[in-house]
Image (tube, rainbow, N blue to C red):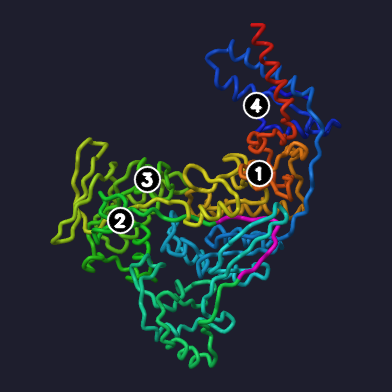
Amino acid sequence: MVVAACSPNLHEQTFRKCIEDAGLNKYLLAMANIREHCSWVHESWPKEATEKAIDAVRMAVARANLLEPLETIKVPVKRSCLVIGGGIAGIQAALDLANEGFDVYLVEKEPSIGGLMAKFDKTFPTMDCSMCILSPKMAEVMHHPKIHLLTNAEVKTVSGFIGNFKVEIEIKPRYIISEICNGCGECVKVCPIEVPSEFDERLGPRKAIFVPFPQAVPLIYIIDIENCIKCYKCVDACVQARGAKAIDFAQEPKRMEIEVGTIIVATGCSTFDPSILEEYGYGTYENVVTALEFERILAPTGPTRGVILRPSDGRIPKRIAFVQCVGSRDKRTNIYCSRVCCMYATKQALLIKERIPDAKVTIFYIDMRAFGKGFEEFYARAQSEGVYYIRGKVAEIIEDPGTKNLKLVAEDTLSGEVIETEADLVILSIGLIPSASTKDLRERIGLLVGPDGFFKEAHPKLRPVDTIVDGIFIAGAAQGPKDISDSVAQASAAAQRASILMSTGEFETEAITARVNGDLCSGCLICVSMCPFNALVVEGKNVNVNQILCKGCGACAAACPAKAIEIMHFKDQQILVEIKALLENVSRL
């Protein structure tokens, strides 16, 4: 069958099903793309577009004469899933799958699950307490019989294929015996070492033995071995409090191997470091802070217990300015919009007005992007409560060395005037960037990343949580900047996609794969290095293709100097007859 229509990416599966229902092998189908290749790109030249469409059909007919029936392979799928990342997306995906009866391994590199959301005070636009929403889900993960929680752990290797992934996980030592520790905290009271707290964005201290935050899950202490002086005061305090020693300095990293049928990557994101933008003075001026640092200042459990104070002198600021799009929508850093900055700045501005009613709060913005449900109303509420919005990008921030006050120089693009505004405190609304673990994980799993550095989905519209590797899905901010509600929704979508595979119990592979002619293969192994899916396996002097991993991209066939590799459904002869059909028509013209 020859179908002249749109791109095979959209409806090839539909037409395959049609001819299969009619009794034909579904691979006896050739498609001529006369939409994207013709009508869409030549709409001003209908005559030429029609002629090109005729050529495309002629080529497809020529190729159809040489098509061969192909057979797919069915592989079993284990009823277990690995979820990488314990932020809100990973938590939601793990709970969804566990509640459906599947075994879930949730791996988090930090000592506690919770991710960035655990650092927030409130959430927009409802102003709900962040931990009030998150804590119950964290506790549910901890106590769910189907979830195997592995914190302070990292995925080291992933091998195998859909339905049968083999994963090696390294669990780093806490130097605490988790079965004995009950989180009483007596060890912390006697620890003499204080270092900046990573959870509080280094604005407050923590001890060398600590839990990241009071609601941490699991609530098991961990020793920062690099800063610990091994005075053993914590050991004595533990024995006195528990009657047993929960501290073990002899612990070493452990390795474990698991087998799972599917994998969900929910590694979240990081925040942009604005110190590279010298015009804002971050890292030089004490009273210039990031929005995430200010989030910890706002939090009741933060370094100032929720009291808004200037870092330089501890005074309550009365003039506060926000600078939007720091690290976003900027050719020097990241050209994409981080999506959350407009609304979290509005949220923080409202919290300032609530705690310092007479404060003057100004937000300098490029465009206000209130795109979500209730966001526009949230923006209007902030305006009605006295938050000033100035459309213009801040060009420079200058500090008065004596008072430590700050002067912002910006252009009001609505009036066309250059304005100068003084502030006691400046908050930089920093954007979201890929997680630091994205690069390593990409190489270990074999996923693609987009130009923005985030994990790339198989199709932005039709397969937004799938990846190029069958059985591996992405969710949350690992795929791109998004807020909490979108992360939760995408996590549930990824869980459902994984659930479908595991519930069915088997997966049917694509038959369009590479084949190696052993008689022609010279064993140069060029093809092995070219394969992006690690589907080529060297066995002695021969190269074999793992038909389950192979996606038929053709990179190996193009690189093979001996022409020993061909792609089924796209054999050289099948392509050559298409070219011949086109050239014969050209010669007649």
Image position of 349 (left or right of 511): left
SS label for mark 2: strand
> CA gap, disc 4 to disc 3?
37 Å
- Of the numbered discs 2 and 3, the one sitting upstream in the chain is 3
> CA gap, disc 1 to disc 4?
37 Å
Q: Nearer the viewer, mark 1 or mark 4?
A: 1
On the image, numbered disc 1 is attached to which residue? Answer: 525
Cβ–Cβ under 8 Å for marks 1 and 3 = no
> Vertical placement of 344 versus 220: above or below?
above
Image position of 261 (left or right of 132): right
- Of the numbered discs 4 and 3, the one sitting upstream in the chain is 4
Cβ–Cβ under 8 Å for marks 1 and 4 = no
SS label for mark 4: loop
Which numbered disc covers residue 427? 2
Residue at (66% x, 56% y) in the render: 159
SS label for mark 3: loop
On the image, numbered disc 3 is attached to which residue? Answer: 333
Asked whether 424 or 443 is in front, the reply is: 443
Residue type, numbered disc 1 = Leu
> CA gap, disc 2 to disc 3?
18 Å
Rendering quarter of residue 315: bottom left
Asked whether 375 or 397 is in front, the reply is: 397
Residue 183 percent location from the top left of the image: 50, 81
**Magenta region: which residues?**
255-266
